[in-house]
Amino acid sequence: MAEDRIDQIINKYMNEKGILIQLLLDIQHEFRWIPKEAIKRISERLKIPSSQIFRVASFYTGLSLKPIGRHLIRVCLGTACYVRGGPRILDTVENKLKIKSGETTSDNKFSLETVNCLGCCALGPVIEIDGQYFGKLNSANLEKALSNYN
Ligand code: FES
């Protein structure tokens, strides 16, 4: 049960000071995001205002206040990828998954985001899925790349 697990993680830090970030990282690691119920529970048990926890969770890029899918798709819209069809690739992924950039599918399988360069411009248009790069994309090999994660 999520509440039990949240309490177990909080228990590790009960008598320590300056542990909020590490605690939130543990929550993030467990749930892949920081659920509101975790913030409420941390606030109650450690007597830290919820607003402070929200501020910390919003500030650190390694922490997410929204659910993150099991697979993260990053579509490059940097200049080199943009002129080679990056926007079309993004449209195709958005239509296939029925989400927009910045969103996660309702089954929490995929999250989608755009980036400004993945550092392999010669391969454009490029996407990255869970750290693996797929370059010189067209609709056929994009479909194939996505099907690896179904
Ligand atoms: S612009 Fe897309 S990888 Fe650099």
Image (spheres, rainbow, N blue to C red):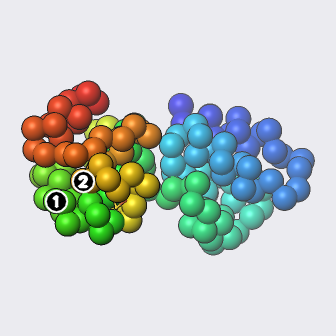
Residue 44 coordinates in the image, percent (x, y): 70, 57
Question: Splitting the image into 4 quarters, where does residue 87 fall?
Answer: bottom left
Pointer 2 residue: 125
Helix, strand or loop status at disc 1: loop
In this rendering, the answer to whether 102 lies above or below 38 is below
Mark 2 element type: loop
* 93 displayed left or right of 47: left
- The reply, left or right, for residue 42 in relation to residue 125 is right
Residue drawn at 70 percent across, 35 percent down: 8
Q: Nearer the viewer, residue 63 or 133?
A: 133
| Disc ID at residue 120 | none
Q: Position of residue 71 (x, y in %)?
A: 37, 39
The amino acid at mark 1 is Gly
| Label 2 CB-ligand 1 distance < 8 A | yes
Quickly name the residue at label 1. 85
Question: 105 above or below 58?
Answer: above
Q: Does the rendering let one see residue 29?
A: yes
Residue located 18% across and 49% down the image: 93
Q: Residues within 10 Å of mark 1 (few under 14, many from 20)?
A: some
Please indicate whether residue 99 sits to the left or right of residue 26 in the image. Answer: left
